[in-house]
Amino acid sequence: MAENSRRPETRDVWPGTLLLFAGGLVVFLLVASGLLYALFVLPPRWPPPGAAWRSNDATPKLSTTPGQDLASTRNEENAELNQLGWVDRAAGIARIPIDDAMKLVVRNGLPVWDKAAAAAGECALLSGDVPRSKQAQQCRERTIKGTAQ
C-alpha cells in the first residue's frame, strides 16, 4: 500500500482568532446598542422652541390655531362661491352662485358638443347661452371678418 504523505493536523481551532472574533463582536454590539440608545432614548439636543424661534424668518410660519384657520378659510371660500362677482371684468368673465348655475343646467341642459353644433358655427353655443357677453361679441366679430374676406 501507498504511504500517506500528509501529516496529521495539530489543531482544529485557533483559540487566539476565536477570542479576537468574540471580542470584536462584543465591542460591535456595545457600540451599536450605545448608538441606538442615543438615537431613540436620549432627548434631542436642539433648543426647545421659544421667542427666538418664533421671530426667525428662515423658519416656516406654523399655525397656532389650525382649526380656526381652516374654518375661516372655508367660510371665505363659501362666501365667494355663493355671490355674484367679476372674475375678469376686462374679459367679461363673471362668477355666479353654484345654486344658480345648477338651476340653469337643469333648466337649459348641458350644451351638446357634437359636429352639428360645430357646423353651425363655433360661436353658436356661446351666442345662444350668453349673447351679451364680451366673448360672444368678439366671436361674432371674428366670424364676420372671416366671412367678409
Image: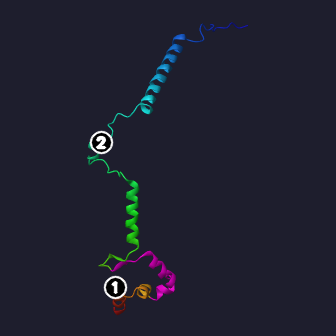
- At label 2, counting other C-alpha atoms closer than 10 Å, the crowd grade (few under 14, some 14-19, many 20 or more) is few
Q: Is residue 55 above or below residue 104?
A: above
Q: Is residue 85 magenta?
A: no
Q: Position of residue 15 (x, y in %)?
A: 54, 11
Q: Is residue 11 above or below residue 78?
A: above
Residue corresponding to mark 2: 50
Residue drawn at (45%, 29%) of the image: 37
Give yes or no for residue 110 being in the magenta stretch.
yes
Q: Is 2 left or right of 38, judged from the image as shown?
A: right
- Residue 99, given in percent of the width and then of the height, sits at 46, 76
Q: Which residues are magenta?
A: 92-120
Determine the image quadrant of residue 1.
top right
Question: The residue under label 2 is which amino acid type?
Answer: Gly
Callout 2: SS: loop
In the picture as drawn, the residue positioned furthest to the bottom comes out as: 148
The answer for how far apart the CA atoms under marks 1 and 2 are is 59 Å
Q: Nearer the viewer, residue 113 or 65?
A: 65
Tell me the crowding category of disc 1: few under 14, some 14 to 19, or many 20 or more residues within 10 angstroms, Cα based: few
Residue type (three-letter) at the residue carrying disc 1: Gln
Question: Which label is found at residue 101?
Answer: none
Q: State the residue position of label 1.
A: 138
Residue 31 lies, with reference to residue 95, above or below; the image says: above
Q: Report the residue that reaches farthest toward the right.
A: 1
Which residue is pictured at 41% across the width and 87% down the height? 127
User: Mark 1 near mark 2, Cβ–Cβ under 8 Å?
Assistant: no
Observer-nearest of 72 and 30: 72
Residue 48's quadrant in the figure?
top left
Where is residue 57 drawn, in percent x and y?
26, 49
Question: Considering depth in this image, is 24 or 91 the residue closer to the camera?
Answer: 91
Q: What colour scheme governs how the chains and residues are painted in the rendered image of this protein?
A: rainbow
Element under disc 1: helix
Mark 1 or 2, nearer chain start: 2
